[in-house]
Image (cartoon, grey):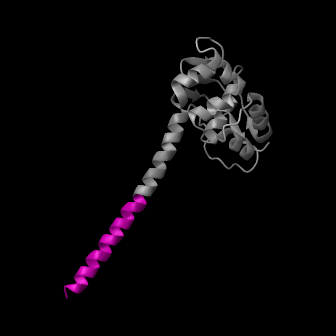
């Protein structure tokens, strides 16, 4: 399954399997273990690395919180079936804290060939902040373009009226 096929299945509401995503990630990304914080849960670089891979995949592909949860597949379903339980703490914390609660010590995934998705976690970078910063940069670019157009239109109007008043 390609990344595009996986994302299409995810967004169409298909039932997802956690191991299918991990296999896809292993086939398409270079992986570097890293410790990370998920809300009030500290994960070392030797534990819960499947969750680390999944979260980074979610950032790279700009997945929503709900899409990320569905990527956990049967593990997310287990949490839904046992809401008062204590299994799968990374899923439970992500439900509570979302993207804002995730912080990684270093990048985890880098696409092996032809990187198409520029969003990757910087060292000690909050994923939510990374996404917000990208959106803000786009906003500033668009705002600058709009201001230039307004300035240009004003110049044309001033020039037009200065010619008609002669």
Q: Which residue is depicted at the point 50% across and 36% down? A: 129
Snapshot quadrant of residue 44: top right
Snapshot quadrant of residue 78: top right
Residue 102 spot, x, y in % from top left: 56, 28
Q: In which quadrant will I find the C terminus? A: bottom left
Which residues are drawn in magenta? 144-166
Q: Which residue is depicted at the point 32% across and 76% down? A: 156
Depth order, front residue of 51/16: 16
Depth order, front residue of 91/102: 91
Residue 37 spot, x, y in % from top left: 58, 23
The question of residue 164 being in magenta is answered with yes
Q: Which residue is depicted at the point 63% across and 32% down? A: 68
Q: Main secondary structure of the magenta part?
A: helix
Residue 43 appears in the rendering: no
Residue 108 appears in the rendering: yes
> What count of labels does the image hold?
0
- Decide if residue 96 is on the left or right side of residue 86: left
The question of residue 53 being in magenta is answered with no
Q: Where 7 falls versus 94 (above or below)?
A: below
Residue 148 spot, x, y in % from top left: 38, 65
Q: In which quadrant will I find the N terminus? A: top right
- Decide if residue 126 is on the left or right side of residue 74: left
């Amino acid at each position: 399954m390609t990344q595009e096929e996986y994302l299409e299945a995810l967004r169409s509401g298909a039932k997802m399997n956690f191991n299918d995503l991990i296999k896809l990630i292993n086939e398409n990304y270079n992986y570097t273990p890293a410790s990370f914080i998920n809300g009030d849960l500290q994960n070392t670089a030797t534990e819960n690395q499947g969750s680390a891979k999944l979260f980074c995949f979610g950032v790279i592909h700009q997945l929503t919180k709900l899409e990320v949860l569905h990527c956990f597949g049967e593990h997310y379903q287990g949490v839904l079936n046992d809401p008062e339980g204590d299994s799968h703490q990374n899923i439970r914390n992500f439900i509570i804290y979302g993207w804002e609660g995730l912080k990684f010590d270093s990048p985890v995934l880098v696409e092996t060939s032809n990187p198409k998705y520029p969003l990757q976690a910087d060292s000690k970078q909050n994923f939510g902040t990374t996404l917000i910063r990208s959106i803000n940069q786009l906003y500033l670019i668009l705002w600058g373009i709009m201001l230039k157009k307004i300035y240009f239109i004003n110049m044309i109007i001033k020039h037009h009226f200065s010619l008609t008043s002669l």
